[in-house]
Image: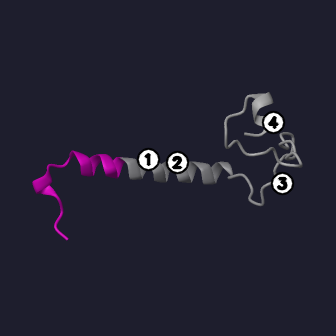
Amino acid sequence: MSRRALAAGLPHGTPQRPASSRPYPAVNDMPPPRATTVLTDAETRKLESELVAARNRAAEAAAKPAGDADQP
């Protein structure tokens, strides 16, 4: 064992510290602005109605008994 390991109390096989420290995380860096725009009210309403219709179709399909499923 080396003197460093004995003096510091480090276990055998502990790797040495890197010569240079890593840079501190850039916590205040903001991402660049998005290239896309926000949806308009009309687009939002259209998407919501499409989602509601898809949810209703899925609920109807789940409520049908297995024998009543449409044949392909």
Q: Who is closer to the viewer here, 8 or 68? A: 8
Q: Are marks 2 and 1 in contact (CB under 8 Å)?
A: yes
Q: Residues within 10 Å of mark 2 (few under 14, many from 20)?
A: few
Q: CA distance from mark 4 to mark 3?
A: 46 Å
* Quadrant holding the C terminus: bottom left
61 with respect to 32 (left or right): left
Please give the name of the residue rendered at 78% of the width and 60% of the height, measured from the top-left corner. 35
Query: Between marks 2 and 1, how big is the CA–CA gap?
Result: 6 Å
Q: Which residue is mark 2?
A: 48
* Amino acid under disc 4: Arg
Residue 6, percent across and down?
Answer: 76, 31
Location of residue 27 in the rendering, given as x and y in whole percent from the top left corner:
83, 40
Kind of element beneath mark 4: helix
- Report the residue that reaches farthest toward the left: 67
The magenta segment is 56-72
Q: Are marks 1 and 4 in contact (CB under 8 Å)?
A: no
Q: Mark 1 vs mark 4: which is more N-terminal? A: 4
Judging by the rendered image, the residue that carries numbered circle 3 is 32
Checking the image for residue 4, the label placed there is 4
Say which residue appears at 41% left-offset and 51% top-offset.
Answer: 53
Q: Is residue 37 above or below residue 17?
A: below
* Gap in angstroms between the C-alphas marked 2 and 3: 28 Å
Q: Nearer the viewer, mark 4 or mark 3?
A: 4
Going from the N terminus, do you reach mark 2 or mark 3 first?
Answer: 3
